[in-house]
Amino acid sequence: MVLVGVAGLTMACGSGRVTAQRASLQAGPASVVAPELAGANSEAPTLRVVDVDGRAVVTDADGRTVYGNTEDTADNFFCTGTCTKTWVPVAIEDGLVSSRLDATRVGVVSHPSGIDQVTYGGIALYTRAADDAVGSLDGRAAGGVWFPLTDTGEFIR
């Protein structure tokens, strides 16, 4: 089990800034820190939604598809070490979230690499280093465990 120390984290929603108070908790990829809404902000979001083949797909700020791993558990990360060169944990950067996402489902967990990794609906988020097109779904079902996420937090299988 991973012990995560969490202090004041600020994230934003397309229509406002989201603030999550961090607290010490026993956590893993399934942990979520519930944010609260406050003031407005117009910066580019860390997480956004792109429509791909009729699906609302979560991407990072650069449009790279965000994936979850079905093997991640509350006390074990599937992707560590050299795996993170291919599947890059989504880190808290500018802390902004698209207004098309439910900000209350956005959280953070301490990845074994030491970064604060973004979660959505309790799923630790990664991008695929090889993705080179906005909303690419090329990594879908890779290894039978990597799947893009919809804006509702469901895996696209």
Image (tube, rainbow, N blue to C red):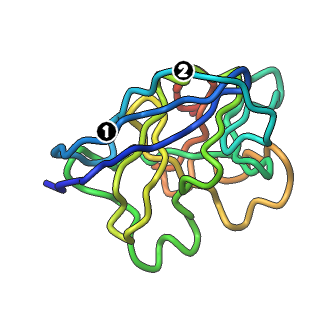
Residue on which disc 2 sits: 37
Q: Residue flagged by tag 2: what amino acid is it?
A: Leu
- Mark 2 lies on a secondary structure that is strand
Q: Where's residue 59, x and y in %?
A: 70, 42
The percent coordinates of residue 122 (x first, y second) are 38, 34
Q: Report crowding for label 2: few under 14, some 14 to 19, many 20 or more residues within 10 A (C-alpha).
A: some
Of residue 44 and residue 72, the one placed in the foreground of this image is 44
Residue at image point 43% right, 57% down: 116
Q: Which mark is residue 30?
A: 1
Number of the front mark, 1 or 2: 2
Q: Position of residue 56 (x, y in %)?
A: 73, 24
Q: Which residue sits at x=57%, y=22%?
A: 38
- Of all residues, the one furthest to the front in this rendering is 39
Other residues around mark 1 within 10 Å, as few (<14) / some (14–19) / many (≥20): some
Which amino acid does the dot numbered 1 rest on? Answer: Ala
Is 55 on the left-hand or right-hand side of 157? right
Whether 138 is drawn above or below 42: the answer is: below
Q: Nearer the viewer, residue 86 or 108?
A: 108
Number of numbered markers: 2
Q: Is residue 3 left or right of residue 41?
A: left
Indicate which disc residue 68 carries. Answer: none
Left or right of residue 106: residue 16:
right
